[in-house]
Amino acid sequence: MASKTVAKDIITLRGSAAIVSEFFGYAANSILYNRGVYPEESFVKVKKYGLPMLLTQDEGVKSFIANLNSQLSEWLEAGQLHRIVLVIMSKATNEVLERWNFTIETDSEVVEKGVSREKSDKEIMREIQAIMRQIASSITYLPCLDEACVFDVLAYTDKDVAVPFTWIESDPKLIANPQMVKLHSFDTKIHKIDTLVSYKNDEWDEQ
């Protein structure tokens, strides 16, 4: 009698770091597109995670995200990265309008002892799909950004981490009395990513 087996994929620290940093690159592109930070025509459609995804063709942004992903992978492999925040600000005033928080929990045993974990790639992809769908539908639950905006990325690391010269110390770019929406999370069994977007209250709603 045939028996059904469920395949589990071996997840290593390096593999998990690659999954998470790649996820952030695609998530950042999706946020910049769906929140209108860059014009629609500057993105091209690709297929990733079983979904149509948008990637910027702006050379400056492409280079920024590529360099960012490389640095994130390094910190993730060392277990030194605790949170990434993509901040959207008013271009005219630098006022912070949105903070997309990606909080990272790392399995310390994997970092310290080099052990691996098991989880199917399909299961990880399904969890990432759920987050990407929520980002794509953000126009339904976030206020319209009706002014020119810019973005920045903050990384929260261990205090003793050597920081590349391209990174500078920053204030946390917080929003006073923000509204918050918790999004789905995903877990490679080595890195668990919780996602939360906080945004500036619409004053009209409070009147």
Image (cartoon, rainbow, N blue to C red):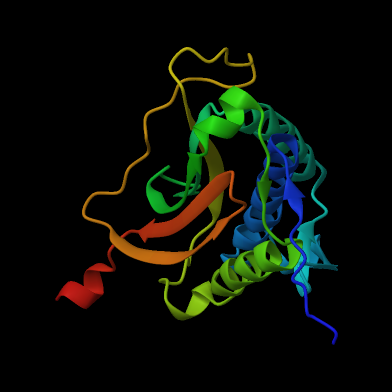
Say left or right for 50 vs 123: right
Q: Is residue 121 above or below residue 20?
A: below
**Quarter assignment of residue 133:** bottom right
Q: Position of residue 96 (x, y in %)?
A: 39, 48
**Quarter assignment of residue 52:** bottom right
**In the image, what residue occupies the spot 47% across and 42% down?**
105
Q: Outermost residue, bottom direction? A: 1
**In the image, what residue occupies the spot 75% across and 42% down?**
15
Q: How many marks?
A: 0
Examine the rendering and report whether any part of residue 78 can be seen. no
Q: Position of residue 130 (x, y in %)?
A: 59, 72
The N terminus appears in which quarter of the rendering? bottom right
**In the image, what residue occupies the spot 52% across and 51% down?**
193
Q: Nearer the viewer, residue 4 or 18?
A: 4
Say left or right for 72 vs 109: right
**Quarter assignment of residue 3:** bottom right
Say left or right for 23 vs 157: right
**In the image, what residue occupies the spot 53% across and 15% down?**
161
Q: Is residue 16 above or below residue 160?
A: below
Q: Is residue 101 above or below residue 14?
A: below
Examine the rendering and report whether any part of residue 61 can be seen. yes
Q: Outermost residue, left direction? A: 207
The C terminus appears in which quarter of the rendering? bottom left
Q: Position of residue 64 (x, y in %)?
A: 72, 37
Q: Position of residue 76 (x, y in %)?
A: 62, 33
Q: Nearer the viewer, residue 26 or 2?
A: 2
Q: Is residue 29 above or below residue 18?
A: below
